[in-house]
Amino acid sequence: MNAREAEVDNLKQQGNACVKEQKYEKAMFHYTHAIKLDPQNYSLYSNRSFAFLMMRQYHYAMEDALMTIQLKPDWSKGYFRKGEVELRTFRFNDALQSYNKALSLQPSESRILEAMNKASKSLIKDKRADQQIPWLGAGVGIILGVIVVIADYVFTNKPTLTHPLLMALLTMSISMLGFGIAKGFRYFVKCQRRNLLEPPVDLFPEEKEDYENIDTERSNEKEKHPKYSKAQARQRFRKGKS
């Protein structure tokens, strides 16, 4: 083992120790340093993916999981890491596919089987919520409609809702409103989940533009003052003398 390999291994071990102590940010820095020294080391990307996952940096966790798969496509842990990110970001179908690929490379692995079981249960629960929550909203709407009808009779001298048809229409309208609100809420939740894997927003884009402007200005200055060869410099010097 040469000096560079020894340093990479040392950084990896430091990162692993930080993970055990749940110091995921420190672990991530150790893995990143090791990756700079050995960018083809697939296990480092896998470990850093886990650190990012525990930090809830799902975009970077997914990037490292995909890099692990790219570098070592026949290694089950890369697909397992990808599945873990997908499970945490509520992509249950995708997670099951990733776990299935991991299981095909490492059959009967208990950890993968447990993860698949968890993803399956979560998928069933999520589909059930999609079906039940809107109807729950409708049920709440019916209760509110009945309360409004009763309140109209109890708290007013001249009730507005005297006809049974009006009572039924009002109750149905509030029930449909509740259904729509609950449906909209589920749609909002799904949109929020989709955004979990989006790259983080650059909070300082202006600074990046300033650096780019400085770089272009420097390059322009270099173009204005081109370098001359020794022969050209001597020729210019003689012209200047004459």
Image (tube, rainbow, N blue to C red):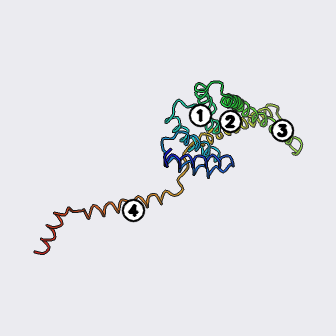
Q: Give how far apart the Cα atoms at labels 1 and 2 are.
A: 38 Å
Q: Which marked residue is nearer to the observer: mark 1 or mark 2?
A: 1
Tell me: 224 left or right of 151.
left
Q: Where residue 155 sits in the image (x, y, percent)?
A: 88, 45
Kindly identify which residue carries mark 4: 214
Q: Amino acid at mark 3?
A: Val
Judging from the image, what secondary structure is the residue with disc 2 in?
Answer: helix
Give the x, y percent position of residue 200: 56, 49
Q: Is residue 235 above or below residue 21?
A: below
3, 31: nearer the viewer: 3
Q: In the current view of this chain or complex, which residue is farthest to the front?
A: 1
Q: Nearer the viewer, residue 181 or 49?
A: 49
Q: Which mark is residue 149?
A: 3
Q: Which residue is mark 1?
A: 77
Marks 2 and 4, Cα distance to the nearest angstrom? 51 Å
In front of the other: 230 or 143: 230
Inter-mark Cα distance, 3 to 2: 25 Å
SS type, badge 4: helix
